[in-house]
Image: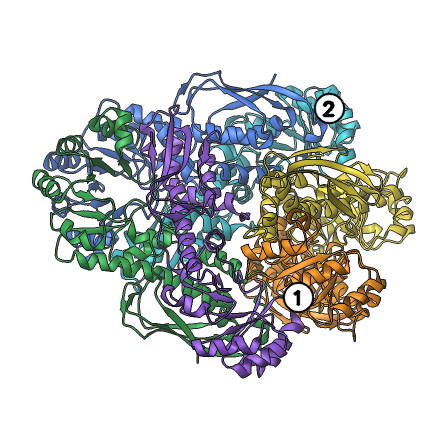
Chain colours: A purple, B green, C orange, D yellow, E blue, F cyan
Amino acid sequence: MDVPASVAEDVARQLIEDIGTGDVTGDLIDPAAQARARIVCRETAVLAGRPWAEECFRRLDAQARIAWHFADGDIVPADAVLCELEGRTRALVAAERNALNFLQTLSGTATTTRRYVDAVAGTGARILDTRKTIPGLRVAQKYAVRCGGGGNHRFGLFDMILIKENHIAAAGGVAAAIAAARRVHPGVFLDCEVESLAELDEAIAAGADRVLLDDFSLDQMRAAVARTAGRVPLEVSGGVELAGVRAIAETGVDFISIGALTKHLRAIDLSMRIL
Amino acid sequence: MDVPASVAEDVARQLIEDIGTGDVTGDLIDPAAQARARIVCRETAVLAGRPWAEECFRRLDAQARIAWHFADGDIVPADAVLCELEGRTRALVAAERNALNFLQTLSGTATTTRRYVDAVAGTGARILDTRKTIPGLRVAQKYAVRCGGGGNHRFGLFDMILIKENHIAAAGGVAAAIAAARRVHPGVFLDCEVESLAELDEAIAAGADRVLLDDFSLDQMRAAVARTAGRVPLEVSGGVELAGVRAIAETGVDFISIGALTKHLRAIDLSMRIL
Amino acid sequence: MDVPASVAEDVARQLIEDIGTGDVTGDLIDPAAQARARIVCRETAVLAGRPWAEECFRRLDAQARIAWHFADGDIVPADAVLCELEGRTRALVAAERNALNFLQTLSGTATTTRRYVDAVAGTGARILDTRKTIPGLRVAQKYAVRCGGGGNHRFGLFDMILIKENHIAAAGGVAAAIAAARRVHPGVFLDCEVESLAELDEAIAAGADRVLLDDFSLDQMRAAVARTAGRVPLEVSGGVELAGVRAIAETGVDFISIGALTKHLRAIDLSMRIL
Amino acid sequence: MDVPASVAEDVARQLIEDIGTGDVTGDLIDPAAQARARIVCRETAVLAGRPWAEECFRRLDAQARIAWHFADGDIVPADAVLCELEGRTRALVAAERNALNFLQTLSGTATTTRRYVDAVAGTGARILDTRKTIPGLRVAQKYAVRCGGGGNHRFGLFDMILIKENHIAAAGGVAAAIAAARRVHPGVFLDCEVESLAELDEAIAAGADRVLLDDFSLDQMRAAVARTAGRVPLEVSGGVELAGVRAIAETGVDFISIGALTKHLRAIDLSMRIL
Amino acid sequence: MDVPASVAEDVARQLIEDIGTGDVTGDLIDPAAQARARIVCRETAVLAGRPWAEECFRRLDAQARIAWHFADGDIVPADAVLCELEGRTRALVAAERNALNFLQTLSGTATTTRRYVDAVAGTGARILDTRKTIPGLRVAQKYAVRCGGGGNHRFGLFDMILIKENHIAAAGGVAAAIAAARRVHPGVFLDCEVESLAELDEAIAAGADRVLLDDFSLDQMRAAVARTAGRVPLEVSGGVELAGVRAIAETGVDFISIGALTKHLRAIDLSMRIL
Amino acid sequence: MDVPASVAEDVARQLIEDIGTGDVTGDLIDPAAQARARIVCRETAVLAGRPWAEECFRRLDAQARIAWHFADGDIVPADAVLCELEGRTRALVAAERNALNFLQTLSGTATTTRRYVDAVAGTGARILDTRKTIPGLRVAQKYAVRCGGGGNHRFGLFDMILIKENHIAAAGGVAAAIAAARRVHPGVFLDCEVESLAELDEAIAAGADRVLLDDFSLDQMRAAVARTAGRVPLEVSGGVELAGVRAIAETGVDFISIGALTKHLRAIDLSMRIL
């Protein structure tokens, strides 16, 4: 899995926030003492966050050794040992919560994503994330979505044109909006939201790279799939829940983008034990 | 509610992450166009995050006007209008998702906190958060916990001594650990985890400011409360769920610290509508 | 033109770099003195950089007034007055070089881009930039390319899949590489470099969103255009110079990406005059 | 060559900008695969930028090995191998463009500088840069100027007094301006711009450390050199082009400061090849 | 001694500030030359600042070796060798002043603290710092106070409730202020300033965790100690000088917080010698 | 007085450090309450730090009004009112300590500087600072030195060549060292340390811009002044105390650089009173 470039900076910020002026309880531990420890995953989960967790331990003890038993993206069974650690006791104890916070959060997102991905298995539909992310965590969450088998929708407002209702109204129609966007940003992927089959036709004719069906019923989705006949990928978004995702996928749409992957979070239950 | 000092920096980082090189779809909107908008809360929630949301709009349009109908900490009924906005259309559209991400995330934490606070209403117990937070969001989450009526446990490793099993083992007992910690950090609040009534006695005698009962049954908690007789506040932590929190509160303990407040997240359903 | 989110931070960094501990010559000027000034463009150019220049003056004098006679993207005739300024003399003098450095650099990139755009006028080809940018200036340069009428290729390694020779070799062929990339990053735009018409066929069949013709002769480009018949946009890259760009455009390819837009720089000749 | 202190931070920012959420094409390459590579310089150039290039590779693969065949400041013949690399294939591929951008940009500035330095060889004149730099790159560009054999003029407004026309007018004459500046900043190098031989005399008498001849003809420069007779170094600036620089140098002035060194940029043609 | 998490960032900022574009005199030294050096402490002092000094040398020469003869918190006799160094000569010379600035500043604070700590030796009183710190240095100064045997008062406005005159007036009395503060911040340590024995009674009854006696005479302090009888720790603050501190300590108060520890600074006389 | 460019960033960092997650006592104050306040200087001092103090109040209350009665550099009599403030009570209370810390620290440095400047009044000698500064505060301290009537020596290793014993040994003599430094850094001010009159002659002959007399007795200083006869400014440094500074100045040297200005700190006694 490709790793974000900001891992070192993410961890530096987190450690400054948590440790600040120093670990006031850590003084009880002999600075020279060494220990071994294990991180255990107490429920079945998809692992995500290894690079951040490693960096937490390494920043506090450059000589710490970490042996992982799983890779990011792996399904970890309940009570499995994620990794074994060896290093200065003080460093392990101070890094513990920081490393676990990254792992429990990102594995949480990966595990949730995996549920949606599994729910549509066998259909051609792919699960995507959205811009509904936790402030400050978008980069890492999008990594976790990939670990869970999902794909990333646009990163932000800058890397994909996504024409919505307001833009269509401002430009005077779907075709006009697409043409205007292409003029200024010719090399940028263009996704266009449509509200009817007529608008779908217009978007395809105007050359959209992908079309987002807004508030379509399942029957309308099937009609859109039939009419499009593979000329352009179709996407469904908006308020999709786990229970309903397979029915949508079976209409034949190509992408389902789901805010719930990244706006909610169920952290995975992990713990570190000093041996 | 006291506001963190980092709001401006939090929002600057978020906008750079989301808008980056510019809003490639925003070009479809006349740069001079003005609009009015509303943010609506689609479910009952405790509001949190106003300072961040405001800063999102103000950074993109210094002249934007925002009229709030609720304050942070207020209970907002479903479908209520949170605020009315007026400003440059492009700025409102570009700021929208950023502002909503702050509001939905922090109101989510405040609302969850409120459920626990309401569950213990009428007992003397207070609900606290923990260090199990989402990386990069601890400051804002602790603000949201306060908006929900909860209190903050230590911010990080630096602002409270929290003596746990490993420290007690390293120091050679509860009393020794407390004495050692006091020597180096005399002015710092000292919380001590204990595993038995005997250790509780020892911690009180050694002058702990608060004692954390680790893995006590409800009966043992009641016994601890009786024995302590108000000499020191008692805290319970570890795996507390909403269903069981009232029973714990009724044992008479003073504080219940709950990781679920900040490690999980159920975002509130909000939307912005351009009028 | 959509504006990057980092303008305030870009300018803060530049002013700290230039002014540092303070303008040691500025003390000769009465701190209360006010002045009017003009920025003049001494050669025909495409303007780019207004938001950065404005921020330079505003950071040093929050009350400074700037009246622009041109917008970013406008063609400015030689010796035209770009803008008129009014504010504290000290602030104008200290901001001058900083503002001019942004304007001369970004207008330089916009003007160069415009030459290429004009050279292909009337063909269907669009001019794009590349990742060959000046370190630290990519965001602003890509904005300037848009001001010059060009489009932006991928921003970095993260927002577009661009399969090259090394990736094809690693994956075992064009089709395998495309399929593998789609699996991990289903929602991301996919551009694929090909070295022959056979590879072009394979890339189209595998569903590339765009195909980059690597080291094709003009005849081969024409053959590729004919064979593709509009099924997918075609791109040409690599060592394109101004003299040769129209011939390439006339082969019928859709995009020509040009490192020279952003790796070289001919700054525009500007000056500020205190009146 | 003395190295700026900000190399690590410059590279961290660049990698975050380029790699962001991760290299989406890099996933096609086996994470464990190792490779060897070479960076080749395709035209004669003065090398500059080694510390930044090395840091690009090291940040992505701490174990990467780099063997350089040239030092910064060396003249590299066309098609020479700059360095040989060995490390994780993914890291080499992801770092490539980032490292090359630093090398091609800074070597470009060093090579341009060298042309001016060579043009004045044998005269006593030294070539200096100016504050006309590319935003965000001043530190690195001034390093590159030194690699090309040039010298650095003031770094910013804070490290040298440079009295110009506006300051002289504000202070009421050359001598008054110099005296006023010395009062507040006694230990700071003082350069004074003059417009006539009379002002030159006044500046020397008032104790300027260097005098800048503004808009002097070649004859006037010679007269100034004769009159000064080595009492103070003389500098010429403003619109100096390569063709005219030797004639200026031969007048006997000591320094020629040239905006073109750093405001324009002709990147050097480099490439990296995986073996 | 527990170490702040920001050492690496503190040093990076310092080196950028000091070395900037490069050490212009360092070029006189052969880049490959190696040297050995010693840091000598020319007066009796309490050492503080080792982690920062080490990081200064390591950032400029990753292979530098440092052998310390003292630990932070140790009393170093005059003319003792603090440490022996070995590394690249250029790096040692460039790092020297940066490392010494950290050591002389932080050891200065530690040494001053130690004087106050020694002055109250044998009493039960503990010496604490305040928020009267040098801008930008609070974290490091509080570390130095601990090295000197003192304790830390609150880190900032966020980690301890400190109710003062203005707050009591705003809330309508001591008891009301304490109750109001507890409601919003139940888990936070609460210190309350009082101006009379009556207010002291009120603060104890309302459950303050510590009481600060504001402007009490020595007799009043003794009365307060007698009346409190150990129910809550008592603190004295405000304008305490070294000469008077023992008399205060002998009244029986628990804590004496002293602005002079961190607002004034007498740097320790250190020097580095290249051997 | 010219103001550093980093004031906004200095204050942002300080407020984040002090206020962090929020002022936990500030909640006792009505968020809408307004107040007036005064900052009083309790001892005679030279004022320095206004821009930082203002920024502290403005960041917390953009509408706060501040009326200053003194400018930076003014001598303020004991018990004078420095400024009057009006704004939100909460903001004034939270900003108070932050603003005072800047003012007391920087006015302390300015006041100390002024003592040395006054001690040499009437001689031709000027007082300079050094690189012996408090980590993280160099920019602001050098500003304060100027407020006190002193001048700034080099800012860091990058803006002045300062040849010392080690460099002379490495280069093989004074003349060789100066020539080598000029070659690489021709436009940079060159100060050279000498240990004898012979070396002084050599340094002058080699064209140093200033010569630093290292460890000269008063008699030797006088001899150096006589021999130099104004050809180059002379500087004395190293362990200069207030008692001895006039005798040095009266030898006729031009500059005396003094580490004590910035390495020690006696903060000025200031307080803010809410009216």
Q: Position of residue E1 (x, y in %)?
A: 37, 28
From what the image shows, is residue C144 above or below residue E186? Answer: below
For mark 1, give the secondary structure.
loop
Query: Which residue, given by chain and number where applicable, does mark 1 sit on?
Result: A187
State the residue at coordinates (43%, 73%): B65
Residue D208 seen in render: no
Q: Nearer the viewer, mark 2 or mark 1?
A: 1
Disc 1: host chain: A
State the residue at coordinates (68%, 64%): C204
Nearest to the observer: residue B6 or residue C158: C158
Nearest to the observer: residue A229 or residue F146: A229
Query: Which residue, given by chain and number where applicable, does mark 2 sit on?
Result: F200
The answer to whether residue F56 is left or right of residue B181 is right
- Residue type at the position of mark 1: Gly
Few, some or many residues within 10 Å of mark 1 (<14, 14–19, 20+): many
From what the image shows, is residue D269 above or below residue D88? Answer: below
- Spatial separation of the CA atoms under disc 2 and disc 1: 66 Å
Q: Position of residue C193 (x, y in %)?
A: 71, 57
From what the image shows, is residue F210 above or below residue E173? Answer: above
- Residue type at the position of mark 2: Leu
